[in-house]
Image (cartoon, rainbow, N blue to C red):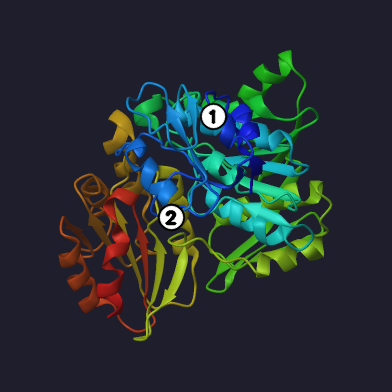
Amino acid sequence: MISQKLKVIEQMAEGSGLSEEHEERLIQGVSIDSRTVKSGNLFIPIIRNLDGHNYVEDAISKGASASLWQKDHPNPPIHLPLIFVDDCLQSLQNLAANYRKGLQIKVIGITGSNGKTTTKEMLNSVLQTKFRVHKTLGNLNSQIGVPLTILDIDKSSEVAVIEMGMSERGQIDRLTRIAQPDLAVITMIGVSHLLSLGSREEIAASKLEIVNGLQNGGVLVYNGDEPLLAKGLEEITSANPLRTISFGEEESNDFKVENTVTNADGSFFTVGDRTYSIPLLGAHNIINALATIAIASKLGVDPAEINEGFQTLKAPGMRMEKIDSPLGFTIINDAWNASPVSMSAAIKTFEELTGYTRKHLVLGDMLELGDQEQDFHRDIGRDLDPNKIHYVYTVGALSRHIAFEAEKRFPNGNVQTFMDKRELAEVLTNKVEKNDVILLKGSRGIQLDSILPLLLQ
């Protein structure tokens, strides 16, 4: 983590006003939460739902060595070691960007509509076979989270895997200029954030901002099956040459996947003349693994080491997470989030699963899809195959449109809609039998995972 004298911190954060008597204080790490502040931290009073300035004195009493203070806030506690800044968030980002410049490390930046966290975890597992790796913890992929991740990097680390999220144009641009990646990854382009961005073209353009912070000689690794990325790259590279590596299912990709098989034990596939396996279900996770293979190969990790890393992978929670009930049925929890692309991928994987007696598909609303939201839900319902799925249950007002289309082809009574998750859990508990399998898929706001205790009790 960052470790510097306070005078240097003032310069890196682009602040001012530090009292001379505090210049030699040593800062070790940063904190934005007075409840978890550690001895030696720099406290940064971010203004969110609560104003961090109200907790500066508390943070220092708990061991923080100093704090930032935003100039537009009155009554600074000038008896404490303070650095004055124009904007605390901007100063956090300045501090992280300047710290990154001094690190002798390979940085991998990851963005995409889906698959960011899974790809991050895959890269962490694979690269650890050869390097000391630092990764984004949890979901710290925001304008606050990315700087905190960078400032926590130990100088002994050799590779940092940094996830970058966004909700509007310009956010990936800011994050990539802070992280200054050597390798940038775009996993895929979906329809998440249509509500704020308006079109898939805008989503692709937002994700492609990640190239703006690439180091000289840096490489973009991207999903070559997505035409919008190819089109956007044509425009970018017409002005500035850019080194790229593509991955996907199409023949034209630099890394092409073939011979894919998914069963209850995981997913198996070949790339070139090598066979790989991952302990995760789904064609979409195979594509995430393919991106991982492309990056790891670029960094000199051989196929045997890559496979070894895949076997130690711990899947992120609620992402095709397999849970075996003591009563003999299986739940696949993919309720972290949902978009039309990720829902279709999860359903396809579910349909192809073998070894189970009956399949129960539980779908919640997909959120933030703009004025086409009903059409997206109807499309999901039209694609459901009654020859591969036995029962369909939907939760929420929007997912009723899934049920409306599914009812046209499924046997009477095999499609049910609910607004109350507890009622759904009761019906499902009474219907599921030994050797059945249940898939839970929906947007985070629906919180489908909340029925797990009811299903497993």
Question: What amino acid type is highlighted by mark number 1?
Answer: Ser
- Residue visible at 22% across and 69% down in the picture: 425
Residue 383 position (above or below residue 437)? above
Residue 197 position (above or below residue 26)? above
**Element carrying mark 2:** loop
- Residue visible at 28% across and 29% down in the picture: 371
Mark identifier at residue 184: none
Residue 130 position (above or below residue 214)? below
Residue 410: x and y in percent read 27, 60
Question: What amino acid type is highlighted by mark number 2?
Answer: Thr
Residue 399: x and y in percent read 25, 48
- Residue visible at 72% across and 33% down in the picture: 101
Residue 70 shown left or right of residue 313 in the figure? left
> Residue 32 versus residue 241: which sits nearer the camera?
32
Q: CA distance from mark 2 to mark 1?
A: 26 Å
> Residue 422 versus residue 416: which sits nearer the camera?
422
Within 10 Å of disc 2 (Cα), the crowding (few <14, some 14-19, many 20+) is few
Mark identifier at residue 19: 1
- Return the residue at label 2: 36
Quadrant in which the C terminus appears: bottom left
